[in-house]
Image (cartoon, grey):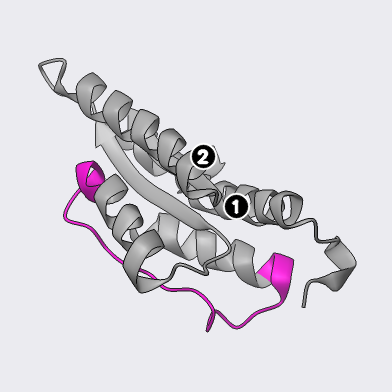
């Protein structure tokens, strides 16, 4: 998880040239808690946020539990993004093994935290009607 956060922070710095002081990192107990946490942040803690990046990982186990968690979280985050009218980038890994997760969190398949942050910034630009040259 820390490598996904580090990737997101690196993307924020590279794209916006910011030292990270404009990023708030909230760690949830698990991926299931992401929608509730982001809802609370949208409504109570930071209603003026330009975007949110949901990072997490669900690894397949012996049952279908992973599919229920992944589906519910992804659907809820998509609905939240449209109802709250704020970009919520999806950086939730859904993998069969820990090795697959590690490969997508800074390994040979890149860093999905980095990718999610870039997507969040790009979508915030689109939704706010900003041009790239107006960003700090």
Q: Which stretch is magenta? A: 14-33
Residue 29 % position (x, y):
16, 55
Of marks 2 and 1, which one's residue comes earlier in the chain?
A: 2
Mark carried by residue 69: none
User: What's the residue at 54%, 79% (across, down)?
Assistant: 22
Residue 132 % position (x, y):
84, 62
User: What's the residue at 19%, 48% (across, down)?
Assistant: 30
Q: Vertically, is 125 above or below 67?
A: below
Which quadrant of the structure image shows residue 47?
bottom left
Which quadrant of the structure image shows residue 94?
top left
User: What's the residue at 38%, 43% (across, down)?
Assistant: 102
Mark carried by residue 120: 1
Is residue 47 or residue 89 the one in the foreground? Answer: 47
Kindly state the secondary structure of the residue where label 2 is placed. helix
User: What's the residue at 85%, 71% (across, down)?
Assistant: 134
Kindly state the secondary structure of the residue where label 1 is placed. helix
Instruction: Report the side of 9 relative to 2 (left or right).
Output: right
Query: Is residue 21 located in the magenta-colored stretch of the structure?
Result: yes
Q: Which residue is label 2 attached to?
A: 82
Report the quarter where the N terminus lies.
Answer: bottom left
Decide whether the magenta segment is chiefly helix, strand or loop: loop
Q: CA distance from mark 2 to mark 1?
A: 14 Å
């Amino acid at each position: 998880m820390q490598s996904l956060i580090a990737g997101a922070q690196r993307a924020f710095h590279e794209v916006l040239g910011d030292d990270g002081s404009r990023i708030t990192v909230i760690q949830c107990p698990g991926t299931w808690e992401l929608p509730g946490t982001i809802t609370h942040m949208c409504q109570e803690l930071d209603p003026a946020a330009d975007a949110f990046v949901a990072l997490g990982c669900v690894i397949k186990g012996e049952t279908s539990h992973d599919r229920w968690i992944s589906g519910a979280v992804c659907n809820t985050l998509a609905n939240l993004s449209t109802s709250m009218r704020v970009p919520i980038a999806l950086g939730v890994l859904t993998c069969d093994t820990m090795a697959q997760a590690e490969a997508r969190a800074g390994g040979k398949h890149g860093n999905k935290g980095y990718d999610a942050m870039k997507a969040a910034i790009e979508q915030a630009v689109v939704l706010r009607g900003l041009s790239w040259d107006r960003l700090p």
